[in-house]
Image: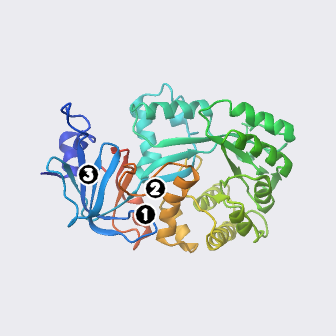
């Protein structure tokens, strides 16, 4: 049995994927090469206790064994990765990202090395195996996705919520001079969604049910317009995200039947405390994006007292959502937010009252369920996909450890590895 130090492999061989055996010749009658991760603390799911000093065996793109070291036999031919001091979890989701920075433009033709470095810095460096793009230029995101899926660029799976439809006069001030498409009435909304979803590569729709038309005013989409857009999307089996901004925008999303709120909705002097319960009853999920509010308001020059008030309201909404049994999904708005590090998001979620298990659920099983990712997705189980993230330390003791990523694996292939 060969025991390999991953740091030495990266430094000495210069081939991140080599230790997986992905590149070496395989006898025609042999199965896929096996990789054994030995000695890590493993969380098979957010709901149960961890397995200490565990072994996880990956064969090809699947997990083929999980359990304590004392119970799992490591195949003699397996490549062994030392997991000492690491915590191993299912690969993370970030369900609110954007590919709108210049470094992502011209994704069809940009040099692969440049694009790979940008994807790593924003996503895979932080354990992301699945990303949901909520409003980037669709052709560009589709080009990026195709290059990732071809194997040319290491990266996460990308789902895309497109359209970015706004109410009349509701194009966001912070995107000016660019303007988003307006939908004036129910018929226009249905037609716009139907045209958009004629493209089978687009996974869903984004609506601005409450949109900051100016820095001090939110324009709310009429419920009938929201409902028409949602019904058109649901007829094609697609999801609908809503950007709510405030309680009226969130209420329009709820009554219009959307599937996911793209943010909490802390704007305004007060908020409707009945909404979390009603959203749970309607099976609406939410990506809180707590870090966004302090980052964006600070950038816009809002005084610290205003930022703190907004943060308190957003945290209260997250806490109420969790206490009412609503589904929370992790998302950070990176790409719009140019600080990619998710550590502050983890800390803010914890301060809002969420446990490590609840945050891990947001990162794994909740989005896997919401996006119908398939059997075993979001867990470390035999037969499930080998989508894994290893971090240094124990995030149950220090939530910041979720950001200390050693490596990220998608379908048994390492798409990020920490450098020495």
Q: Position of residue 361 (x, y in %)?
A: 50, 63
Query: What's the coloring here?
Result: rainbow
Gap in angstroms between the C-alphas marked 2 and 1 = 7 Å
Q: Position of residue 170 (x, y in %)?
A: 80, 45
Of the two numbered discs 2 and 1 on the same chain, state the one appearing first in sequence.
Answer: 1
Of the two numbered discs 3 and 1 on the same chain, state the one appearing first in sequence.
Answer: 1
Residue indicated by mark 1 = 45
Callout 2: few (<14), some (14-19), or many (20+) C-alpha neighbours within 10 Å? many
Q: Secondary structure at mark 2?
A: loop
Residue indicated by mark 2 = 378
Of residues 233 and 82, which is closer to you in this image?
233
| Contact flag, marks 2 and 1 (Cβ < 8 Å) | yes
Gap in angstroms between the C-alphas marked 3 and 1 = 29 Å
Mark 3 or 2, which is nearer the eye? Answer: 2
Q: Residue at x 76, y 54 (%)?
A: 253
Q: Secondary structure at mark 1?
A: loop
Q: Secondary structure at mark 3?
A: loop
Callout 1: few (<14), some (14-19), or many (20+) C-alpha neighbours within 10 Å? many
Of residues 291 and 24, which is closer to you in this image?
24
Q: Is residue 417 visible?
A: no
Residue 55 vs 52, above or below: the answer is above
| Residue at the extreme top | 109
Q: Is residue 129 visible?
A: yes
Q: Identify the disc placed on residue 420.
A: 3
Of residues 68 and 364, which is closer to you in this image?
68
């Amino acid at each position: 049995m060969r025991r390999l130090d991953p740091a030495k492999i990266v430094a000495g061989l210069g081939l991140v994927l080599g230790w997986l055996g992905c590149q070496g010749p395989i006898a025609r009658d042999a199965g896929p090469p096996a990789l054994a991760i030995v000695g890590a603390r493993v969380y098979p799911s957010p709901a149960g206790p961890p397995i200490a000093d565990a072994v996880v065996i990956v064969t090809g793109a699947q997990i083929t064994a999980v359990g304590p070291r004392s119970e799992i036999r490591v195949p003699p031919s397996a490549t062994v990765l030392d997991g000492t001091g690491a915590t191993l979890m299912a690969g993370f989701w970030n369900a609110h990202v954007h590919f709108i920075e210049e470094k992502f433009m011209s994704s069809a033709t940009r040099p692969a090395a440049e694009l790979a470095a940008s994807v790593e810095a924003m996503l895979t460096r932080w354990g992301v195996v699945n990303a949901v793009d909520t409003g980037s230029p669709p052709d560009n995101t589709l080009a990026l996705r195709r290059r990732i899926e071809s194997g040319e660029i290491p990266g996460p799976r990308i789902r895309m919520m497109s359209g970015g439809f706004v109410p009349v006069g509701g194009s966001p001030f912070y995107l000016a001079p660019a303007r988003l498409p307006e939908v004036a009435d129910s018929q226009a909304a249905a037609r716009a969604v139907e045209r958009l979803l004629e493209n089978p590569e687009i996974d869903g729709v984004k609506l601005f049910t409450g949109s900051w038309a100016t820095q001090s005013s939110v324009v709310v989409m009429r419920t009938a317009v929201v409902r028409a857009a949602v019904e058109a999307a649901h007829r094609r089996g697609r999801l609908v995200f809503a950007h709510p901004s405030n309680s009226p925008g969130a209420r329009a999303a709820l009554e219009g039947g959307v599937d996911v709120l793209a943010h909490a909705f802390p704007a305004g002097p007060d908020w409707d405390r009945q909404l979390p319960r009603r959203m749970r009853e309607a099976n609406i999920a939410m990506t809180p994006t707590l870090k966004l509010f302090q980052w964006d308001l600070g950038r816009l020059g809002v005084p610290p007292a205003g930022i703190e008030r907004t943060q308190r309201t957003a945290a209260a909404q997250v806490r109420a959502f969790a206490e009412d049994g609503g589904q929370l999904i992790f998302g950070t708005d990176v790409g719009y937010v140019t600080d990619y590090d998710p550590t502050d998001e983890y800390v803010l979620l914890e301060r809002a009252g969420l446990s490590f298990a609840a945050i891990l659920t947001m990162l794994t099983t909740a989005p896997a369920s919401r996006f119908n990712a398939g059997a075993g997705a979001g867990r470390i189980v035999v037969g499930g996909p080998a989508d894994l993230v290893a971090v240094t330390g124990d995030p149950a003791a220090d939530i910041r450890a979720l950001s200390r990523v050693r490596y990220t694996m998608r379908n048994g292939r390492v798409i990020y590895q920490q450098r020495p």
